[in-house]
């Protein structure tokens, strides 16, 4: 299950056959994001396990399984900012239950990212997915 925004990214990836173009596209997605306020770059929002500095700030609307999940994020690395934008596209607007049901590994595999990211970047991407899943689980548990 993927959002329409993620489907659009997947379609663009199919259109862009060259990985250089795909990397530029991911970087452009990151550049298009609003920067995170310095005040939100705190230990509580920092994602551990990433080679770069990464912050994810949850934006939860509602409570319980029907709570809508959203988040903002930022990184000191342009490619990672782009990966955050891809994750926002994958999860933004889903309910907590829907977000927990997303097979992020399978969805991201559609983009071929694991084959073209360094092991450090792949580990960081997994850490970001785990943070999003933790946000969704926490929202689902709040009633």
Image (cartoon, grey):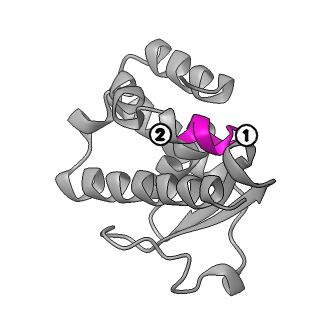
Residue found at the very far front of the displayed protein? 143
What label sits on residue 40 in the rendered view? none
Q: Position of residue 5 (x, y in %)?
A: 66, 28
Q: Which residue is mark 2?
A: 24
Residue in the foreground of this view, choosing between 58 and 63: 63
Q: CA distance from mark 2 to mark 1?
A: 26 Å
10 Å neighbourhood of mark 1: few (<14), some, or many (≥20)? some
Q: On the image, which quarter does residue 23 sit in? A: top left
Q: Circle 2 — which element?
A: helix
Q: Quadrant of the C terminus?
A: bottom right
Q: Kindly identify the residue that appears in the image at 21 percent across and 50 percent down.
A: 118
Residues marked 2 and 1 touching at CB (< 8 Å) = no
Q: Circle 1 — which element?
A: loop
Q: Kindly identify the residue that appears in the image at 43 percent across and 31 percent down.
A: 22
Count of numbered tags = 2
Against 4, residue 35 (above or below) is below
What label sits on residue 93 in the rendered view? 1
Q: Kindly identify the residue that appears in the image at 26 percent across and 56 percent down.
A: 123
Any magenta on residue 71? no
Residue 48 in view of the camera: yes
């Amino acid at each position: 299950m993927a959002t329409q925004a993620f489907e659009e990214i997947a379609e663009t990836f199919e259109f862009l056959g060259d990985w250089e173009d795909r990397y530029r596209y991911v970087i452009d997605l990151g550049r298009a994001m609003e920067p995170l306020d310095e005040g939100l770059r705190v230990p509580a929002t920092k994602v551990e396990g990433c080679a770069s500095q990464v912050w994810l700030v949850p934006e939860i609307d509602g409570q319980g399984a029907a709570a809508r999940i959203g988040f903002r994020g930022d990184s000191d690395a342009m490619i990672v900012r782009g990966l955050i934008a891809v994750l926002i596209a994958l999860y933004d607007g889903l309910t907590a239950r829907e977000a927990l049901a997303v097979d992020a590994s399978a969805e991201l595999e559609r983009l071929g990212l694991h084959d073209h990211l360094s092991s450090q970047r792949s580990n960081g991407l997994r850490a970001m997915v785990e943070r999003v899943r933790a946000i969704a689980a926490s929202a689902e548990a709040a009633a």
